[in-house]
Image (spheres, helix red, strand yellow):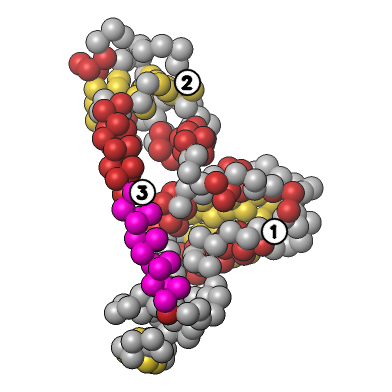
Amino acid sequence: MASTHKCEYCGSTITSEDRFCPNCGAENPNYIADTPRQVFLPRTVAELKEYCAERGMPLLRMRFFIGEDYREPKAFGIYRDGDEFVVYKNKADGSRAVRYRGPDEAHAVDEIFTKLLEECHNRGIYPDGKPAEGARSGKKKTSLLRIFLTLLAVMLAVSLISAAISGFFHRNDGYYNFGGGTVYYHHGPSWYYTYDDNSSGYWYEADSAPASDPSEYYIGEDWDSDWGVSDFKESSTWESIQESSSSSSSDYDSWDSGGTDWDSDW
């Protein structure tokens, strides 16, 4: 349970869940970094995917496979098997250690999420927020807050411009069916395709657009299982695209999976 304190700079009431004073912006020396309000706790596999995507985590490089029964060595993962959820680690020798198997999705997600954060923290990366470093002078904190707010405004402006540019190039993104059991997905300037009997679920990049005017073959932006092909946005191809486009995620650029103990059970 959160404890209540007085801000030592302005006297406002704050709690251990407040990293900064809501009134003056001073850092709270009593802040507890792992309170539920400050650390978003994903409870489902879908929420975990969203958490990782929002932070630009290159999961392939990090060797985390969310929602996938990945069988190669050196991997952590979680997937659904019928009514059960399986959390696993594939060791360096290819053997598998199952951390959890059971019906409790929230518990399964917590197991893999805790390991994900542990691997990040071991590399000096804190997607859940850096630990509090202790109080500094109120004046310095106020200056830092102003700098932060200025940088935030600049980043917001850049994001809006980037979103407008992205919207222009991705306005025709979606699924297209040209017949013959093959379905295409358009993403930006590129085309990808798969077919109805492709058990691997892999999507291949096409050399060129499948038609001079593909608009008449458009079938939708969101995947439908009735089409008989796998979901493009659940494929390893899509993950690779997200990883390569995550240039802003500089914290992960030097990630080396060799820093993980792949011989232990977990």
- Mark 3 and mark 1: Cα distance apart in space: 42 Å
Residue 146 point in image, percent of width and height: 36, 64
Count all numbered tags in the image, as a single digit.
3
Residue annotated with mark 3: 155
Q: Amino acid at mark 1?
A: Ala
- According to the picture, the residue beneath numbered tag 2 turns out to be 205
Percent position of residue 233, x then y = 40, 38
Residue located farthest toward the top when viewing the structure as drawn? 212
Which of marks 3 and 2 precedes in the sequence? 3
Query: Residues under labels 1 and 2: Cα distance?
Result: 34 Å
Could you tell me which secondary element the residue under label 1 belongs to?
strand
User: Local crowd at mark 1 within 10 Å, few (<14), some, or many (≥20)?
Assistant: some
Q: Quadrant of the C terminus?
A: bottom right
State the residue at coordinates (69%, 58%).
Answer: 97
Q: Secondary structure at mark 2?
A: strand
Instruction: Point out the stretch of residues depicted in magenta.
Output: 139-154
Please, is residue 206 above or below residue 188 in the view? above
Q: Amino acid at mark 2?
A: Glu
